[in-house]
Image (cartoon, rainbow, N blue to C red):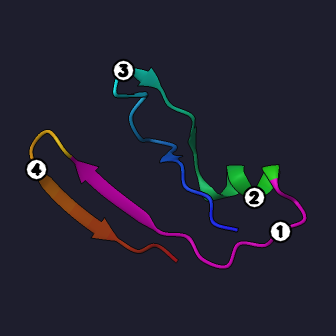
Amino acid sequence: MIIGTFAANGPQACSGLPTARHDPDDLAAQFPNLRIVRTSREDTTLRRHTFSRSRDS
Protein backbone atom coordinates (compact mmCIF):
# COMPACT_ATOMS: atom_id res chain seq x y z
CA MET A 1 0.00 0.00 0.00
CA ILE A 2 1.28 3.46 -0.85
CA ILE A 3 -0.02 6.40 1.15
CA GLY A 4 0.70 10.03 0.27
CA THR A 5 -0.07 12.92 2.58
CA PHE A 6 1.03 16.40 3.51
CA ALA A 7 3.82 16.48 6.10
CA ALA A 8 3.00 17.37 9.70
CA ASN A 9 4.69 20.74 9.17
CA GLY A 10 3.31 21.13 5.64
CA PRO A 11 0.82 23.69 4.38
CA GLN A 12 -2.49 24.13 6.16
CA ALA A 13 -4.26 24.60 2.83
CA CYS A 14 -3.72 23.64 -0.80
CA SER A 15 -5.63 25.30 -3.65
CA GLY A 16 -7.80 26.95 -1.03
CA LEU A 17 -8.80 23.67 0.63
CA PRO A 18 -7.73 22.52 4.11
CA THR A 19 -5.18 19.70 4.23
CA ALA A 20 -4.76 16.75 6.55
CA ARG A 21 -1.14 16.65 7.73
CA HIS A 22 0.64 13.61 9.16
CA ASP A 23 4.05 12.22 9.98
CA PRO A 24 5.01 8.53 9.56
CA ASP A 25 4.31 7.73 13.22
CA ASP A 26 0.80 9.22 13.00
CA LEU A 27 0.04 7.09 9.95
CA ALA A 28 1.50 3.95 11.52
CA ALA A 29 -0.87 4.42 14.45
CA GLN A 30 -3.80 4.54 12.01
CA PHE A 31 -2.74 1.24 10.39
CA PRO A 32 -1.45 -0.93 13.26
CA ASN A 33 -1.49 -4.15 11.20
CA LEU A 34 0.85 -2.75 8.56
CA ARG A 35 4.56 -2.09 8.85
CA ILE A 36 6.43 0.85 7.37
CA VAL A 37 8.89 -0.27 4.73
CA ARG A 38 10.09 3.15 3.61
CA THR A 39 9.26 6.80 4.05
CA SER A 40 10.28 9.72 1.88
CA ARG A 41 9.65 13.41 1.77
CA GLU A 42 9.39 15.64 -1.25
CA ASP A 43 9.34 19.41 -0.83
CA THR A 44 7.73 21.42 -3.61
CA THR A 45 7.07 25.12 -4.03
CA LEU A 46 5.07 25.71 -7.19
CA ARG A 47 4.66 29.46 -6.88
CA ARG A 48 8.40 30.02 -7.22
CA HIS A 49 8.91 27.13 -9.63
CA THR A 50 11.56 25.56 -7.39
CA PHE A 51 11.60 21.89 -6.52
CA SER A 52 13.68 19.88 -4.07
CA ARG A 53 13.58 16.20 -3.31
CA SER A 54 14.95 14.45 -0.25
CA ARG A 55 14.72 10.88 0.95
CA ASP A 56 14.21 10.10 4.60
CA SER A 57 14.59 6.50 5.72
* Label 1 packing within 10 angstroms: few (<14), some (14-19), many (20+): few
Residue at 36% from the left image edge and 61% from the top image edge: 42
Q: How far apart are marks 4 and 1 (CA)?
A: 36 Å
Q: Where is residue 27 in the image (x, y as percent from the top left)?
A: 70, 53
Can you give x and y, in whole percent of width and height, for residue 18 in the image? Answer: 48, 23
Say whether marks 4 and 3 touch (CB < 8 Å).
Answer: no
| Of the image marks 4 and 2, the number of the one nearer the N terminus | 2
User: Which mark, by number, is residue 16?
Assistant: 3
Q: In this view, does 15 lie to the left or right of 17?
A: left
Count neighbours of disc 4 (C-alpha within 10 A) and say few if under 14, some if 14 to 19, many if 20 or more: few
Q: Is mark 1 on a helix, strand or loop?
A: loop
Residue at x-position 19% and y-position 59%: 51
Q: Which is more N-terminal, label 1 or label 3?
A: 3
| Residue 46: mark in rendering | none
- Separation of marks 3 and 2 at Cα, in angstroms: 28 Å
Question: In which image quadrant can residue 53 be found?
Answer: bottom left
Query: Residue sitting at 46 percent across and 73 percent down?
Result: 56
Of the image marks 3 and 2, the number of the one nearer the N terminus: 3
Q: Name the residue tied to disc 4.
A: 49
- Residue farthest toward the left in the current orientation of the protein: 48
Q: How far apart are marks 4 and 2 (CA)?
A: 32 Å
Residue to which mark 2 is pinned: 28
> Does residue 39 sit above or below 23 in this rendering?
below
Q: Where is residue 1 in the image (x, y as percent from the top left)?
A: 70, 68
Stretch in magenta: 31-45
Could you tell which of marks 4 and 1 lies nearer the N-terminus?
1
Disc 1: which residue:
34
Of the residues shown, which amino acid type is indicated by label 1?
Answer: Leu
Q: How far apart are the two marked residues, 2 and 1, measured between alpha carbons?
A: 7 Å
How packed mark 3 is, by other alpha carbons closer than 10 Å (few <14, some 14-19, many 20 or more), is few
| Foreground: disc 3 or disc 1 | 3
Q: What residue type is labelled 4?
A: His
